[in-house]
Image: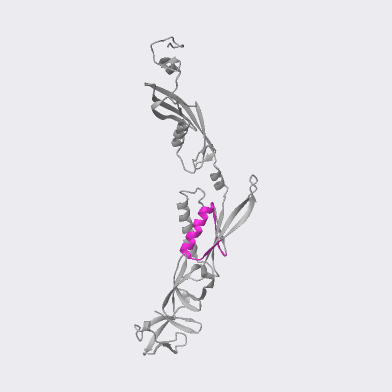
Amino acid sequence: MFCPECGSTDKKMVGNICIDCFLKEFQLIELPKRIEVQICSHCNSKLEEGKWSEEFIPEEEIIYRALERNIKVADEVENENITLEIEQIRGTIANCNVEAIGEVQGTQIEETHECEVKLLKTVCPTCSKIQSGYYETVIQFRADSREIRSEEYAKADEIVERTLIKQSKSDKLAYCPQIAKLKEGYDYYIGSFKSGKKVAENLKEEFGGVIKESPRLISEDKSTGKGLYRIWISVRIPEFEVDDFVKYEDKIIKVTSIGKNSVVGVELSANKKHNIPMKNMEDIELVKKSSEVETTTIISKSPQFIQILDPIDYSAVDLNMREEYNSLNVGEEIELIRIDNNVYLLI
């Protein structure tokens, strides 16, 4: 066979032409002279196939990825090796070189291509939301029938900040554009529902209490006709605190700890530990604050009674002897609490 291009009859044929004529027109790779990439000027995420990436990408990495994505290697190429180089970046334009080496029909060939990558600065939808103060969730931090103390607000602020920092690694809307400081409590506005829910869970884990969600219709998506909602999440912490005294199922209990799912305390009349589910918070009644604890003195002991001095009128008060009082000594000071006309010694 002879090559119709050059007339050669002694060369390897590729299809209808010789290998030399084939390689003369052959291209290892195809690459556009100019590539445009939309990137967010705030977070450096990029738009690719109609979707924005959720990660921060350095500009040089964006350029290299754009080159890689637009290189097309011919099917006939084997053992290819492609080297990318950014020669110069001027403003938003990067001048790049692409060197390609590969084998075609047993022959090694090399190519060099020049390409210009232009970064089109814009704002991604997420950053646009952040700039506008967008939020999906409001966390209402409240206390049940009492004012929240300043140190509790400070702790809540710390929990919100710490949670959002952790969430921001996977959620760009993990931010708090506004804190409304109201008389009844703080409202934390959170960018995403996912992170807002995590904030609420962490507040409950620290303070105990009850979480309730309330969606509110704010508008309608014109393209789908579906309602757009914001979620209000109420975190209502207990009226009582650690060392306060509560009544539950007719038992007087001193609170020793408050957790995410339960209240732990000791029954005063029986020195018995109780674990009350937090879901029953509405059935727990605060009867005395820890600040109402009084101090008295033991004036006598007998097998049947222990006698103390009433700190109000200094009269003698006899209490039935209990096993846990055996270690107490005459003249020793001890704390007490008065509840429903009963006096309880606090061991």
* Location of residue 325 with respect to 50 vertically, above or below: below
The location of residue 166, given as percent across then percent down, is 45, 52
- Comparing 51 with 237, the one in front is 51
Q: Which residues are magenta?
A: 183-212
Name above or below for residue 321 compared with residue 54: below
Name the quarter where the N terminus is drawn. top left
Name the one closer to the observer, 272 or 315. 272
Q: Quadrant of residue 65?
A: top left
Q: Residue 83 in the image: x percent, y percent?
A: 39, 29
Residue 163 lies, in percent from the top left, at 47, 55
- When asked about the image quadrant of residue 128, the answer is top right
In which image quadrant can residue 311 be found?
Answer: bottom left
Question: Does residue 37 lie above or below 249 as drawn?
Answer: above
Q: For this rendering, which residue is in front, 118 or 248?
A: 248
Q: Does residue 232 show up?
A: yes
Q: Quadrant of the C terminus?
A: bottom left
Q: What coloring was used for the rendering?
A: one colour
The image shows residue 31 at horizontal and vertical percentages of 47, 27
* Count of numbered marks: 0
Residue 238 can be seen, yes or no: no
Viewer-nearest residue: 37 or 92: 37
